[in-house]
Image (cartoon, rainbow, N blue to C red):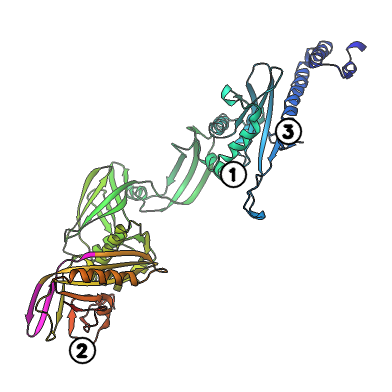
Amino acid sequence: MSDTSPSTATDASVGWADVVALGRQLTRQLGDGCDDLALSWMAHHVGRRGEKRFDVMCSDAGVTCNRSIEDDNGWDKLIEFPARPAPFAAIDMQPAHLVAAVQVKTTEGSPRTVSISLSNALRHATSDLPQFIVLVALDGVQPRYFAKHVWGSVIADWLKAGRQADADGVTATHKVQISLTFGSEDERGSGLLEWIRSEINAVAEPYAATKRRFVDLVGFESDRGTARITLALQSGDELLDVQLGLRPEVEAKHFTYTSERFGIRARRPEIDEHNVKLHLMPEGRECTLRIEMPDGAGVPLPATLYSASSGGALAFRVASRALDITVGPRDRVRAKASLGLDDRAGLDEISAFAHLISSKPESDVALQVNVDGSDLDLGAIRMKGNRQTETWSWIALGTGIARAIAADAGRDPGEFRMGDVQDAAGDLQILAALASNRVIRVDFRPEPDAPERFDGFLAYCSAIIGDQVFSAVAHRPLGIDETHNGRRRVMFGPGRTLWSRMSRRDVWSEEPMQSAYQRQLERLCEGAEIMAIGNLAKMVKSGYEDAILSSDLPSGLERDSRKQVGARVCPVRDGSVRR
């Protein structure tokens, strides 16, 4: 027995073949019950050979390699790449070193498939650290190195395996083995460590956040789960309102939610509650709501289309921020236009809202919806209640001009607080008087040297909405010029914007607008008589009692009233008749 005892393996010249033979002799001596022990012992030593080669590779490359003392989380080595200094960066702004966790697998011969416990695979997939599986193949004089980055399809496959195990009722994931096969495309050779570094750098920073987003979303592309709700409702119409999003809060007797990932449903609900209050918002389809005003003006609005059914009854809803319309069930139609002071909306929505509430109660407002290229005629509505003041009509025109200014600048004006729009009501009215298609009248007692005719009207102004300034220079052609009882009444046609600009309030200056006004004035005055008003806001707001000039322009001073205003004839830069 002494010649076969383990002590004979202490000679330094014993090779790996002798170790394998020794293992087999131990198995024969101790019996078949020792098979697993011997194989485990042999696999352990094979694994150590692969790990030692990886350690040497790291040492040669100057990469710190820390061995896992307690292998509870699946990785064998924690490697740290030295930071590459940035020549011109301060010390405190130098790049950090890269860290990665590596599990080293070793095989002998040709096999390129290894096993990983499901528990470790899931740790690799969800860890914030970069994770790599390295295979050291001992099948020749020199080892061959293969590697996979735990990313993309590897993460997806392992999470799917975890989801399937959950559906199958598995609880001991450390006892479940999954296979990982390395192909020729995974062979990295002596450039293994540099490949690991490049894989980490290829992921958008920060690495952990990018990986977390992928882990959170993968497998949920087509469906996230199923909710089952038992509602406490009194009628089918109430259920329709819930589906249309008209009742965002509802009492539920029972609510369960079971997630579905990779098309596999979890074995039990993640949420299971009784007698709860739910806040629901159904998913709708994007559409365009076109509002046609009584004057023919059309305003397209982004909207959402919701549909609902219950017990054979059907209903649908078209919701935009300016107007909300519900059709059904049966012949019921509901429409509501509402924007609160703290609500935010785009200029197109605000303009549509202002048009709606300034429309006459007896006037029809036509509605159409376009969904995926198909038009749906919703008929017409009439606004109820007291007609709003004339101010809103001017605001509708003014916000329309502001939209056009933003479009000419190629900029998205964003959204505005409705309270800021109302604060800008005076400015918007004057902007509309300057450049809208509404005809304006100027009535004045002419001076003896006043020209016999006017060919046009030129002025400029700005409107401040929130933190944005909309500026314009506009011209209006002559419409009617007549004299009654010693006063001259001149009607000017639709405005045409000659120059415009959208600026932030903190950088806005009046000088570019004044310069543009002077250039246009010089151009228009060649062979024509121009009523050069200059700053229209200054004229409108001056309000001299002995004014010799008056008009039907908005006052810009009060939101809910209009009054006749006047202005003196001023120097050319601020307004005059120019030959």
In the picture, the quarter occupied by the C terminus is bottom left
Give the residues in magenta: 480-497
In the picture, the quarter occupied by the N terminus is top right
Compared with residue 415, is residue 61 higher up or lower down, i.e. above or below? above
Identify the residue position indicated by label 2 in the image. 546
Please state if 509 lies on the left or on the right of 336 as rendered. right
Given the image, on which type of amino acid does mark 2 rest?
Asp
Identify the residue position indicated by label 1 in the image. 208
Q: Residue drawn 70% across and 17% down?
A: 140
Q: Alpha carbon of mark 3 to alpha carbon of mark 2: how far?
A: 96 Å
* Residue 60 circle label: 3
Residue 118 in magenta? no
Q: Alpha carbon of mark 3 to alpha carbon of mark 1: how far?
A: 28 Å
Q: Would you say the residues marked 3 and 1 are in contact, meaning their CB atoms lie under 8 Å apart? A: no
- When asked about the image quadrant of residue 512, the answer is bottom left
Front residue (pair 470, 94): 94
Comparing labels 3 and 1, the label whose residue is closer to the camera: 3
> Looking at the image, is mark 3 or mark 2 earlier in the sequence?
3
- State the residue lying farthest toward the right: 2
Please state if 511 lies on the left or on the right of 579 as rendered. right
